[in-house]
Image: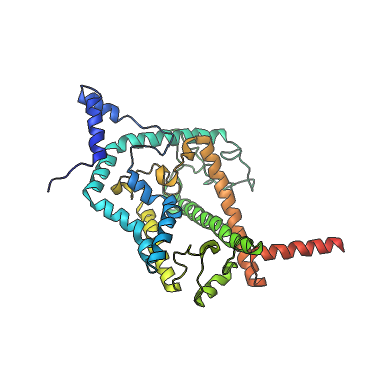
Amino acid sequence: RPRVASPRVARARGARVRSSGDVDDASKSSEAPPDASGAPSSPDSSPLGDLISSPLFYVTAGIALGVAVVQKFENAALFLSAFPIVGLTVLSKTDFGAELEREVLRKRPALVAAAEARDEARFEARRTLSHFFGKDRPLFVNDPPKYLKGELPGDYGFDPLGFAAPPISVISASSAPMDVETPKSSSNPVLNANLDRLVELELLHARWAMLAVVGVVVPELLASTETLPIAEPVWWRVGAAKAAGENLDYLGLGGFVIAGKQGIAIIALCQLVLMGGPEYARFVGIRSLEPVGVYLPGDKNYPGGAPFDPFGLAGDATFYEQQRVAEIKHGRLAMVAMAGVFAQALATRTGPVENLRDALAFVTEGMSS
């Protein structure tokens, strides 16, 4: 069966030929490394793939579509949860998807060169941010482990139990000292297996904790201030309310329900389908979206590209490194906050907002007496 090039690919090919009488020159110009700034408006990815794979799709058009569909078809929540991964899979199996993948593979050398230039700029930015990175950064201990060299955001040299130490086999097989400074030609830190895994897990838990703190506090705050009527504002009582058959409208807005009318089993299945796709893509690796024409220039922890950096905020190397430090600091605070929320819920059987108000009232009463 003949394969038909997509209109976008055909236009790109025509533009290269028309721009010069020499086809080779036109091809060379098209292979020039793209701007390393990381701007999202790049022809190197599929706009359709960028859209479906972008987290913004879930919280904007995805939710709007979900509300509209579920209002007409009450049992459509499971279908909507599966739409992103199914849509990307179907796109990758079409002729259009095959053309997108070939286009990305053709441009991959130039894209990789641009990503390396970006990493080099970030390496230089880390060298200038000595209060966050390098040997002059603040430390929690006087003699930090040799595998913590100040290359990572939030590295204070603190690993008292040695969880991030290199595996024994690596230490015995390596003759190079562990405190060798990362050479300029290697702009990305080379981490041992234990440290690499713990960095990934810390980021995952930190990001979930930041979302969780907002999800725990905001409903109770809105309900306590009578800003919006919330069916069950206290986070740990939501499961019981759902088991009792209550309909949970998001933010108390009537009709703004996607899975709120479903039972716990259906909600759990929706979560499994909705998160299964992204988790599988993360497990497969950074190139998992290339079959739909999406090139991600980063790594598993910071993928970058249009889906994960739609506003191009990571284009400035110094700003990017500062935000990485800010993210891990806020994430660690959020993890501690969620641990406190769990403990207080178990001890007081109330929510964090009520806990805070009770604590402030106790302090005020004590000071007045």
Instruction: Judge from the rendering whether residue 358 lies leftward or rightward of residue 205; answer left or right.
Output: right
Instruction: Judge from the rendering whether residue 147 lies leftward or rightward of residue 96; answer left or right.
Output: right
Where residue 180 appears, as percent x and y from the top left, is 49, 39
Which residue is found at the position 55% from the left and 58% from the top?
209
Residue ranking furthest to the left:
1
Quadrant of the drawing holding the C terminus: bottom right
Which residue is found at the position 51% from the left and 68% from the top?
248
Where residue 158 appears, as percent x and y from the top left, is 59, 50
Residue ranking furthest to the top:
21
Where residue 327 appears, as percent x and y from the top left, is 55, 48
Residue 188 picture quarter: top left
Q: Is residue 229 visible?
A: yes
In this rendering, the answer to whether 6 lies above or below 358 is above
Residue ranking furthest to the right:
369
Residue sitting nearer the eye, 55 or 68: 68
Residue sitting nearer the eye, 151 or 61: 61
Which residue is found at the position 23% from the left and 42% from the top?
6
Instruction: Judge from the rendering whether residue 120 lies leftward or rightward of residue 221; answer left or right.
Output: left
Residue 34 picture quarter: top left
Residue sitting nearer the eye, 167 or 243: 243
- Identify the coloring: rainbow
In this rendering, the answer to whether 362 lies above or below 173 is below
Report the number of numbered marks: 0
Q: Is residue 149 visible?
A: no
Where residue 17 appears, as percent x and y from the top left, is 22, 27
Which residue is found at the position 47% from the left and 64% from the top?
257
In this rendering, the answer to whether 360 lies above or below 96 is below
Residue sitting nearer the eye, 2 or 259: 259
